[in-house]
Image: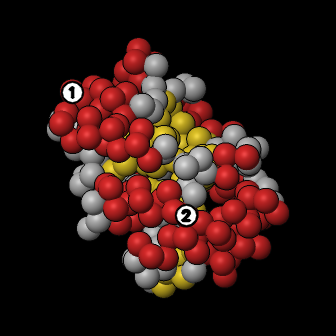
Amino acid sequence: MKAFYSAYPCRLGLVSISFRDRTPEEILTAMQQAQLSYVEWGSDVHAPCRNKERLAELVRLQNAYGITCSSYGTYFRLGETPLEELPAYIAAAKRLGTDVLRLWCGRKSGAACTEEEKKALLAQCKTAASIAEENRVTLCLECHIKTFTERMEDALWLMREVGSPYFQMYWQPNQFRTVEENLTYAKAISPYTKVLHVFNWKEHEKNPLAEAIDIWKDYLSCFDGSQTLLLEHMPDGKLETLAGEAEALLEIVTQA
């Protein structure tokens, strides 16, 4: 079944770690029913980078369900995971059919880093960017809380200092910031952004995306439409909720 979402310019899909306790086939079945076309496999449960048999099975399932791997959601953490391990993640991404990998950067906000820590992290990022260029893949940092790119100013500094098209960003709203603060970050980082993680999460409460349609239309107005939009964090953690979240996402992109 060909997803009707493919008629729209945005690439719409799902982050597999939204359902860590479900099998890849269960996830792809629900995605097909929700008419989502792209998946970001997580390296922690569904797509371990060194498990070639599992990766091959995922490719088989992708082909069977007509779903494309948009990105590889690794838990490679710059500044902590040895860079010698990066090629294994890159190889896994290519096996899955994608050239986009999500990484985390550091273990604390840039605001909490010393100048020496910033310099060391920058050096790692520059080396990682060179490895990415050699392999023709794009490494993207998630603006996740408790990582170096949690704050807009630190993410911008890093993007400008590294200065590589092979080293880019994801964007997602920070559940502990105001809409206005998130909009400011989105506008600033948009030239460097490849993927958006889409959810409705306020502080400690995950809510239906349908309750944040207007907010997300404003968020999307900060971007040029070339980004992949991936649902993440179901409000109740249930696979059965995916169809409704996908409907809300479609409403957002068709009205933005």
Q: What residue appears at the point 34 percent right and 62 percent down from the top-left corner? A: 26
Q: Quadrant of residue 58?
A: top left
Distance, label 1 to label 2, CA atoms, is: 39 Å
Q: Position of residue 200 (x, y in %)?
A: 57, 74
Q: Residue at x 35, y 44 (%)?
A: 61
**Which residue lies at the image location 30% right of the left edge and 26% below the top edge?**
91
- What is the tally of numbered marks visible in this picture? 2
Instruction: Examine the rendering and report whether any part of residue 139 can be seen.
Output: no
Question: Is residue 224 at least partly visible in the picture?
Answer: yes
Circle 2: residue type? Ala
Q: Position of residue 177 (x, y in %)?
A: 59, 73
Instruction: Classify mark 1: residues with Cα within 10 Å, few (<14), some (14-19) or many (20+).
Output: few
Q: Residue 34 has which mark?
A: 2
Give x and y (percent) for residue 206.
49, 80
Quadrant, the C terminus: bottom right
87 sits to left or right of 221: left
- In the image, residue 211 above or below residue 169: below
Residue in front for this viewpoint, 250 or 183: 250
Location of mark 1 (residue): 84
Mark 1 lies on a secondary structure that is helix
Q: Residue at x 67, y 46 (%)?
A: 6
